[in-house]
Image: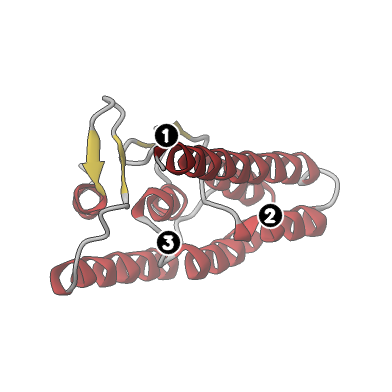
Amino acid sequence: MLKPAIEREASATRGSFENLLTSERLLDSAIKMIATDINAAVDLARARLNYPAGYMLTHFLHRLAAVDQQAADRSYAQVLGVYGDKPMREFLYLQGYTFAWRETLNTPVSSFYIVPANFVANQSLQRQFVQVLLRRAQQVLEGPLDEGDAYRTSHNVSMPGTVHLLEGLNPT
């Protein structure tokens, strides 16, 4: 009995890793396409919305913003709609773009970004992100915690998603 459970867990972990790898490859390809065909790059990035969010998503948005910030902002709004209810380990990657942060440390993979010199933070998108974050905080207060929404900090300490939520509310 124990062996099938271990095999199922290993298979789920492998599937999760493969999904993340596919997502990152799609975004890497989309980044490379920005210089030659922005519309195709955006379409490719949109196709990866069925996969987990990761640091490459923010990299893509910044690279797109360097060429066409309006397209990047529209893509961000769509991404926020898709990942707003996803686990905190995915959702918090979205904070880097909207606030023009050069780094995110409260995500599963600490990331450093190159924010375009001409980038102008969109206050409407910032408000939308904060509204989703506050809604998520309210859900934590009202309902049972999602015990599966935990991940390791940059110091390799496992923390529940609620800790990362608090860090998202107080990023200093």
Measured Cα–Cα span from mark 1 to mark 2: 20 Å
Dot 2 surroundings within 10 Å: few (below 14), some, or many (20 or more)? Answer: many
Using residue 55 as the reference point, say whether residue 87 is left or right of it. left
Using residue 90 as the reference point, say whether residue 130 is left or right of it. left
> How far from the left and from the top, in percent, is residue 155?
26, 25
Q: Amino acid at mark 3?
A: Lys
Measured Cα–Cα span from mark 3 to mark 1: 16 Å
Image quadrant containing the C terminus = top left
Q: Is residue 116 above or below residue 92?
A: above
The residue at the point 25 percent across, 35 percent down is 158
Q: Residue furthest right?
A: 36
Could you say whether the residue bearing mark 3 is in a helix, strand or loop? loop
Name the residue beneath numbered marker 1. Answer: 109
Using residue 67 as the reference point, say whether residue 13 is left or right of it. left
Q: Are marks 3 and 1 in contact (CB under 8 Å)?
A: no
> How far from the left and from the top, in percent, is residue 35?
80, 43
Name the residue beneath numbered marker 2. Answer: 45
Judge by depth and name the residue closer to the eye, 100 or 78.
78
- Disc 3 versus disc 1: nearer the observer: 3
- Among the two numbered marks 3 and 1 on one chain, the one whose residue lies closer to the N terminus: 3
Q: Amino acid at mark 2?
A: Ala
Q: Residue furthest top?
A: 155
Q: Amino acid at mark 1?
A: Val
Judge by depth and name the residue closer to the eye, 13 or 60.
13
Dot 1 surroundings within 10 Å: few (below 14), some, or many (20 or more)? Answer: some
> How far from the left and from the top, in percent, is residue 1?
41, 43
Measured Cα–Cα span from mark 3 to mark 2: 18 Å
The residue at the point 52 percent across, 45 percent down is 12
- Among the two numbered marks 3 and 2 on one chain, the one whose residue lies closer to the N terminus: 2
Could you say whether the residue bearing mark 1 is in a helix, strand or loop? loop
Q: Quadrant of residue 128?
A: bottom left
Judge by depth and name the residue closer to the eye, 126 or 117.
126
